[in-house]
Image (cartoon, rainbow, N blue to C red):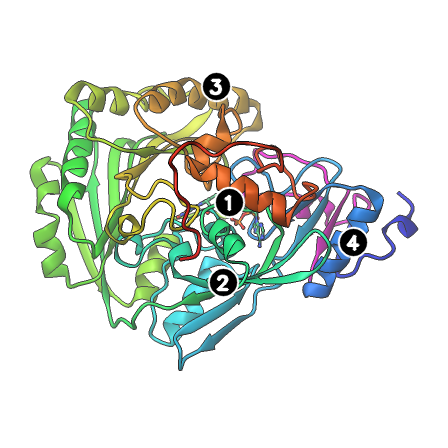
Amino acid sequence: MDKTYFRGLTGDIVTPESPEYDSARQEWNRAINKFPLVIVYCNNRYDVQNAIRWAEHRNVQVRIRSGGHNYEGYSVGDGVLVIDISRMNRIFLDASRNLLSVEGGATNEQIYDYVSSKGYPFPGGTCPTVAVSGLALGGGWGLSCRNFGLACDSLTQIEMIDYRGHLLIANCYCNSDLFWACRGGGGGNFGVIVSMTFSLPPKVYKVTLAEIYYPDTDTCEQAEFIKIWQKFFEYADRRITLIASIYNDESDGRAVYCRGIFYGTPDEAAKILKPFGAIKSAQFDYHYLTFLQAITRIGESYPDSQKFKSTGRFVQRKYRDEELVNIATLVDNRPEGSVYTAITLYALGGKVAERSRSDTAFYYRSSRYIMGIQSVWVASQFARQNVAWVNERFQYLKSITKGSYVNFPYSKLRNYLEEYYGDNVYYLELVNRKYDPYNFFKFPQSLYSGERMPSDGYLYSYSG
Ligand SMILES: Cc1cc2nc3c(=O)[nH]c(=O)nc-3n(C[C@H](O)[C@H](O)[C@H](O)COP(=O)(O)OP(=O)(O)OC[C@H]3O[C@@H](n4cnc5c(N)ncnc54)[C@H](O)[C@@H]3O)c2cc1C
């Protein structure tokens, strides 16, 4: 393409002719293979505005990318302009008001490093390289969420560049409908969020990193683990949040690994977590660490990238014994080429459930936990088998759950808007129509500005 075609764009421009094009078009999920027309690494808001205006004049579709961790690769696309804001990652602390403002490209790791140096924890996610704007737009599950709420629950303000290139501020008082929508309504829908302001939780000295490992488990023990888990989280102390993987690993075999953060001492954690010792093989490990040490250890388990297929559903009820066995059986046979299959449980409840489902766009407030399914492979030729493996098992998961987590999107999901947003979808569409009336920002599962009637009797309170 003639270089003059890209005249008007500012920032660092990467086109198919650039030597760095192949690395720049990659997502964290290396199973995604898209070929954008141009990638603009924005250094400031002006670059974002120029990219939007350029795309609008040339009728080129845009995608927004911050951390590049979307499971389905919705932050890139074939023939699109990618507005990449990963270099806009400055962080500002207003210590007198415990407010933290971060640019849209700041990652979990960058924020953890910064706030921990001042003594604060932060309700971000587990993977160091996920961008906090992408995370919080979909809700933002993390290992502090039962204690402090989702990442989006700590948001006090966002700044967004809209389809006209205008900068909008949204908070409880100003553009409050947009502010409501940006707390759970998913990334990529309304505009480019260039800044988020969070209210920080109280400073903390140390936390307990708890780990429970069950090596060489069989289906019955794995089912037993989920039984303990579902009972435990009915009444669990909200200071503890856990994530657990029931997995089948190429080298490790079948096992369960559960870990989490407890805002208290190891002694207290050991008492609270006693029920998980009912399975004989349980190995407990407790470390009393600074928040940064704990979250860094968790983050160290993530590779730089992976090829995977995964998604996640909300669990609303306790399962019967035969259902628990069915769930554990899902990871029985790894597909050809798979190195790891897993069912992963992400605890909810506590502070997450204290808000109502219409308080923010994150609808599934009262769910017990998220249940994810995943297969990971190395050689590209096995992609089809691994994707099919997840697709087949997803049918069962769907039949026993209600609603999908928008941060764990699934391209094959039917009625995806209702699945992601429940009844909040109607209001989200109204907000979308107001702030992106021409669907300038779109991707395969985006909100659209079409007509839809709200369901009867559903009240929206979108200011809080
Ligand atoms: C290894 C891994 C670990 C994860 N761990 C967690 C976890 O602990 N908790 C959790 O809740 N989720 C987790 N996720 C899911 C993750 O939160 C979502 O995929 C999130 O949307 C990623 O944001 P991103 O900016 O990194 O990705 P991107 O691919 O850049 O963006 C994701 C989506 O949001 C849009 N978007 C991103 N930034 C902006 C912005 N500034 N303005 C407007 N739209 C934007 C994009 O267009 C895209 O649609 C994980 C994902 C991976 C791959």
Question: Which of the two discs, 1 and 3, labels the residue nearer the N terminus?
Answer: 1
Ligand 1 within 8 Å of disc 1? The answer is yes
The residue type indicated by label 1 comes to Gly
Q: Residue furthest bottom?
A: 96
Which type of secondary structure does the marked residue at label 4 adopt? helix
Above or below: residue 122 compared with residue 430: below
Question: Which of the two discs, 3 and 4, labels the residue nearer the N terminus?
Answer: 4
Q: Which residues are magenta?
A: 15-42
Ligand 1 within 8 Å of disc 2? The answer is no
Question: Given this view, does label 4 or label 2 mark the residue nearer the observer?
Answer: 2
Is residue 439 rendered to the left or right of residue 301? right
Residue annotated with mark 4:
53
Q: Does the image show residue 166? A: yes
Residue annotated with mark 3:
388
Say if the magenta span includes residue 18.
yes
Is residue 386 rendered to the left or right of residue 221? right
Question: Given this view, does label 2 or label 3 mark the residue nearer the observer?
Answer: 2
* Residue 247 image offset from top left, x and y in percent: 31, 32
Question: Given this view, does label 1 or label 3 mark the residue nearer the observer?
Answer: 1
Ligand 1 within 8 Å of disc 4? The answer is no
The residue type indicated by label 2 comes to Asn
Is residue 250 rendered to the left or right of residue 160? left
Residue annotated with mark 2:
171
Above or below: residue 122 compared with residue 346: below
Q: Residues within 10 Å of mark 3 (few under 14, many from 20)?
A: some
The quadrant of the picture occupied by the C terminus is bottom left
Q: Residue 186 has which mark? A: 1
